[in-house]
Amino acid sequence: MPIFLLIRHAENDYVKKGRLPGRKPDIHLNKKGLAQAQALAEKLKDAPIKAIYSSPLERAIETAEPLANALGLQVIPRPGLIEADVGEWTDRTVKSLGRLKEWRRVQHSPSLMRFPGGESFLETQYRICQEIETLRALHDQQDLIACVSHADPIKMAVAYYLGMPLDLFQRLSVAPASITALMIGDMGSRLLALNYDFSLNLAKP
């Protein structure tokens, strides 16, 4: 079964400031994010990765590029890996959205929610899983494949392949520049790692 490394893009100022970027263009990694992308490349430089696919948004491409350079591969943009279309909520702060009754639905019943003027959660989950299945068909059973995407699509993909109800996907956590590993085959799937964040420091200060 091929193994998919689902990598969330590294930090940018939208993540840091609690804004909802959606598909807004021209959002670039900040200084910390650039360091995270380099650390990710260093961590995976000896991995037998066969291909690197990425959401076409800049913050994802910039996360994928150091890894591609380290492995001598090209970053292949894939629209199916793009962030959820949050429509009219693009560029809004999470704090302001938290006052809306629709935000409670996002957190507790996302399967019933469509972003105003954007995608529904069901559509986003279907899209990301269809993309993974398309990529799986392009590779051999033993291949290791890297896909740089976004937090919610990655969490929704994990929920699907684990048989978890979509309404529970918010219980999963995917940090910037973290790695989630899924082994996916015709007879089932296995979660090998969730939110592997090698920058996490659990030592006492």
Image (cartoon, rainbow, N blue to C red):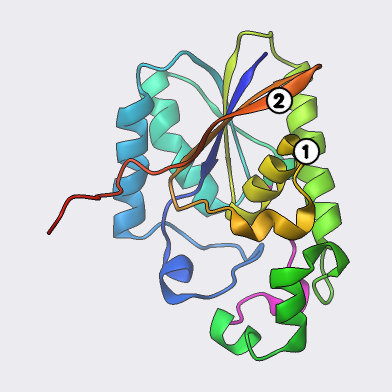
Q: Residue at x 80, y 72 (%)?
A: 115
Within 10 angstroms of label 1, few (less than 14), some, or many (20 or more) residues?
Answer: many
Residue 17: give x, y in percent of width and height.
43, 76
Describe the element under mark 2 as helix, strand or loop: strand
- Which residue sits at x=76%, y=22%? 188
For marks 1 and 2, give the one nearer the viewer: 2
Q: Which residue is mark 1?
A: 129
Compare residues 49 and 34 and report the one nearer the observer: 49
Which quadrant: the C terminus?
bottom left
Q: Is residue 92 above or below residue 200?
A: below
Q: Is residue 183 left or right of residue 84?
A: left
The spot of residue 153 in percent (x, y) is 68, 50
Q: Is residue 15 left or right of residue 2?
A: left
Residue at the extreme left: 205
Q: Residue at x 61, y 8 (%)?
A: 142
Magenta segment boundaries in residue numbering: 82-93
Quadrant of the drawing holding the N terminus: top right
**Of the image marks 1 and 2, the number of the one nearer the N terminus:** 1
Q: Give me the disc on residue 189.
A: 2
Q: Is residue 31 left or right of residue 48?
A: left
Q: Secondary structure at mark 1?
A: helix
| Pick the front one: 25 or 119 | 119
Magenta region includes residue 91: yes
On residue 177, the disc is none
User: Taking 176 as reference, is 141 above or below it?
Assistant: above
Q: Position of residue 150 (x, y in %)?
A: 59, 51
**Three-letter amino acid code at the position of disc 1:** Cys
Q: CA distance from mark 1 to mark 2?
A: 12 Å
The amino acid type found where label 2 is placed reads: Ser
- Is the stretch drawn in magenta largely helix, strand or loop? loop
Q: Is residue 57 above or below residue 38?
A: below
Residue 139: % across, % down: 70, 13
